[in-house]
């Protein structure tokens, strides 16, 4: 599972979701969880609308008010169902094979 805590990152959130999805094999990526930490407008109304969430298998957890990075990570981690949970900032572009070192170490 990949957890992305996002606060007001709009287009970056979308690009990060796309990058995670496109660089992670389907047999490795169980889910992408975006924690919308008080964005205005909510990410589900701007950049992560239903069609995008379906296409990339994204689940959004929404905080109506900002709780901060640690709180967003905690809530995302608690919601994750994967055996391995990876946390990325909401403005990164992981490269192909990024997951290999994690799996090799575990």
Image: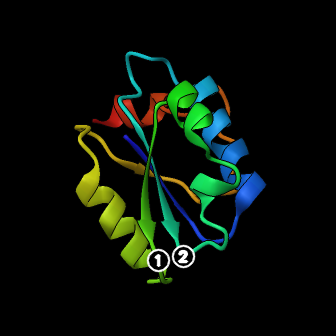
Of 83 and 11, nearer the camera is 11
What colouring does the structure picture have? rainbow
With respect to residue 12, does 98 lie above or below? above
Q: Position of residue 80 (x, y in %)?
A: 28, 48
Residue shown at the point (41%, 77%) measured from the top left: 70
| Total numbered badges shown on the rendered structure | 2
Q: Position of residue 79 (x, y in %)?
A: 26, 53
Of the 4 image quadrants, the one containing the N terminus is: top left
Residue shown at the point (47%, 27%) measured from the top left: 100
Of the 4 image quadrants, the one containing the C terminus is: top left
Mark sitting on residue 56: none
* 33 displayed left or right of 52: left
Of 86 and 16, nearer the camera is 16
> Which callout, 1 or 2, points at the residue further toward the start of the chain?
2
Of 95 and 14, nearer the camera is 14
* 33 displayed left or right of 18: left
**CB under 8 Å between callouts 1 and 2?**
yes
Residue shown at the point (50%, 83%) measured from the top left: 66
Residues packed near mark 1 inside 10 Å, few (<14), some (14 to 19) or many (20 plus): few
Q: Position of residue 39 (x, y in %)?
A: 61, 72
- Where disc 1 sits, the SS reads loop
Mark sitting on residue 38: 2
Residue shown at the point (61%, 44%) measured from the top left: 49
Q: Rounded to the nearest whole Å, what is the CA distance between mark 1 and mark 2?
A: 5 Å
Q: Which residue is mark 1?
A: 64
Q: Position of residue 76 (x, y in %)?
A: 35, 59
- Where disc 2 sits, the SS reads loop
Which residue is situated farthest in the right direction here?
11
């Amino acid at each position: 599972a990949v957890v992305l805590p996002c606060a007001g990152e709009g287009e970056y959130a979308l690009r990060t979701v796309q990058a995670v999805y496109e660089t992670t094999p389907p047999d490795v990526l169980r889910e992408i969880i975006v924690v919308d930490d008080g964005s205005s407008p909510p990410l589900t109304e701007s950049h992560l609308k239903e069609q995008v969430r379906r296409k990339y298998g994204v689940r959004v957890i929404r905080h109506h008010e900002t709780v901060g990075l640690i709180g967003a990570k905690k809530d995302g981690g608690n919601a994750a169902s994967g055996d391995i949970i990876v946390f990325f900032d909401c403005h990164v572009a992981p490269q192909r094979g990024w997951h290999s070192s994690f799996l090799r170490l575990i």
